[in-house]
Amino acid sequence: VDGLDLDYDLLPFQKGKAVYMSSRATGFDHFTLYPLSFYEEGISNGAVSLNALFSGAYEDGLTATTDFSLEGLILALSKGGFPVSLGKKTSTYPRKIYQTLLKGALSKESKTEQSPERISALLKRYASAVGTIEKNTDMLRDLRGRDPSLAESTLYDLLNALRRLLILDEIEAWYPPIKASPTIRRLSKKEFIDPSLALVFQKKGDADLRKDPLLLQRLFEGACARDLKVYSSGMGGKVKYYEDRFGLRSDLALFLKNGKYALIQCRLGENDGKASEAQLLELKKKILIHDSRDAENMIGLPSFLLVLDNSASAYRSKNGVYHCPLACLGE
């Protein structure tokens, strides 16, 4: 598909990373076309290998450095990982996707004619909840404030169309059979296939990210999820998240087809990194206690705990938790 013009059939990418997926439910295999990872863009030096983390290659220590700055991260998140933007400091491609959706691509995919105003409001409202597990019923209530005729079935039809168009790439919840499992959240986390879309759909840009640390954090988490999906594709990776109603969480949980898994936090601040390490250790302890009490439903311990950040160096803490800049991670 190289060299073709942007149109409905190409949403959202002209080319990208084809990630192999297997569906047990249907028995058919398929590919998901992802944007470029930080490594493919040349942002990450790939000094820390995801494969090596799973194999235990860094148990004696981890050393890697990067000079990728916070400003660089803001610009990268704003530009997006689209191949047509490779080597450019800025890109209008995310906005082209937005305009294509408004001009009929979403209506065509959903097989129901929708006004540009309704589509714009939906995209903006969904983008405002990026990185959260907000209920769709809450989103519907807000949208009906200005669009009373919006039916629940129409909303779900449009969301499903956005998934088929590879605009949405939500993250499923992981709910292991640990004690008090009903307290574990089970809603999917709202995400786009590329974090830049969350900015464009809210009509925001890099200047807004500099003033909004919460939005920056959410988009960083989206970039981490995207890159982990790409890097783990050869291992049959599946990205999920864990969160319970008591506040214990793992931003991401990466599962391989061989049964191994890792618990991962995505944090920008140094103090947040320390708190994230404590959260991961607490969740690991909870799993260990469960396994010691319920041999028939053992979960098994994670292969490693990882905090992804935007710092200058990677290391292994005294507690055995890896801290790694996203700009150092690779396959």
Image (cartoon, rainbow, N blue to C red):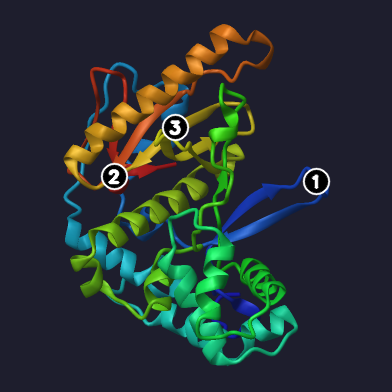
Disc 2 target residue: 267
Depth order, front residue of 287/68: 287
- Residue shown at the point (32%, 57%) measured from the top left: 42
Residue nearest the observer in this picture, 173 or 51: 173
The residue singled out by tag 1 in the image is 25
Can residue 5 be seen from the camera position used here?
A: no
Q: Earlier in the sequence, mark 1 or mark 2?
A: 1
Left or right, 265 with reference to 236: left
* Residue 307, x across and y down, in percent: 32, 36
- Which residue is painted at 58% across and 49% down in the image? 187
Q: Is residue 292 visible?
A: yes
Residue 303 vs residue 118, the one in the foreground: 118
Q: Position of residue 166 (x, y in %)?
A: 59, 67
The residue under label 3 is 263
Query: To which quarter of the image does residue 330 belong?
Result: top left
Crowdedness near tag 1: few (<14), some (14–19) or many (≥20) residues, C-alpha within 10 Å: few
Q: Amino acid at mark 2?
A: Arg
Alpha carbon distance from label 3 to label 2: 13 Å
Residue 207 lies left or right of residue 175; in this view the side is left
Q: Residues within 10 Å of mark 2 (few under 14, many from 20)?
A: many
At mark 3, the secondary structure is: strand
Q: Position of residue 35 (x, y in %)?
A: 48, 63
Local secondary structure at mark 2: loop
Amino acid bearing label 3: Leu
Q: Is residue 17 above or below residue 294?
A: below
